[in-house]
Image (tube, helix red, strand yellow):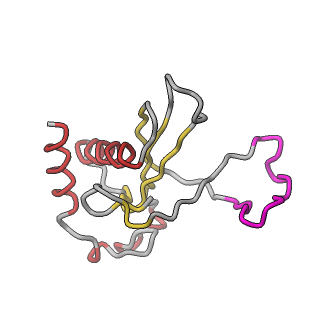
Amino acid sequence: MYPNEEFTDVVDKNYTISLWVPGHYQGEAPAPTVHEVKICHVPKSRGYSREFSGFATQGKALEEGLRLRAALLADKIRDSDERHLWLAVYDPPTKILHRRNEVLFDACDDGQHEKGRHKNGFADSELPHNVISKLHNLYQALFG
């Protein structure tokens, strides 16, 4: 999802659902039988995550994204790309207790963050400089 600057809503409500292909199908996954389903090979990447329990609603994902961002700021980690918030839901909707979810930010690798440009194409100068302070203030207001 693509959160707005304040992490109070998402900018684009067009979601993509990804499923992990089990190891014995890696490289030779069965062909999809529906044209909307596509097999995509995702390259290895690095990022930062925060685990949480309960049902992963959009609001809960945004709240946990704020918490992840605050933890990264507290640890002085500056190579996260917070414009895209990944949500991983590991349990089926029928599981009620002990659910496991994660929110994730991509990390900007050295080769993808060259000359002040993030891997999504935005230059550092194009980033709103007050986003971090807004996130911090909103986090403090919500969670103390």
Most common secondary structure along the magenta stretch:
loop
Side of 140 relative to 3 (left or right):
left
Image x and y of residue 79, in percent: 36, 57
58 left or right of 130 in image? right
Q: Is residue 44 left or right of residue 124?
A: right
- Magenta residues? 22-41
The residue depicted at 35 percent of the width and 49 percent of the height is 62
Identify the residue at the far front of this view.
94
Q: In which image quadrant can residue 122 be found?
A: bottom left
- In the rendered image, residue 139 lying in the magenta stretch gets the answer no
Q: Nearer the viewer, residue 85 or 46?
A: 85
Q: Quadrant of the N terminus?
A: bottom left
Q: Is residue 137 above or below residue 75?
A: below
Q: Locate residue 58, reporting x and y percent.
A: 41, 49
For image coordinates 43% across by 75% down, the residue present is: 121
Question: Farthest top residue?
Answer: 97
Q: Is residue 33 magenta?
A: yes
Quarter of the figure with the C terminus: top left
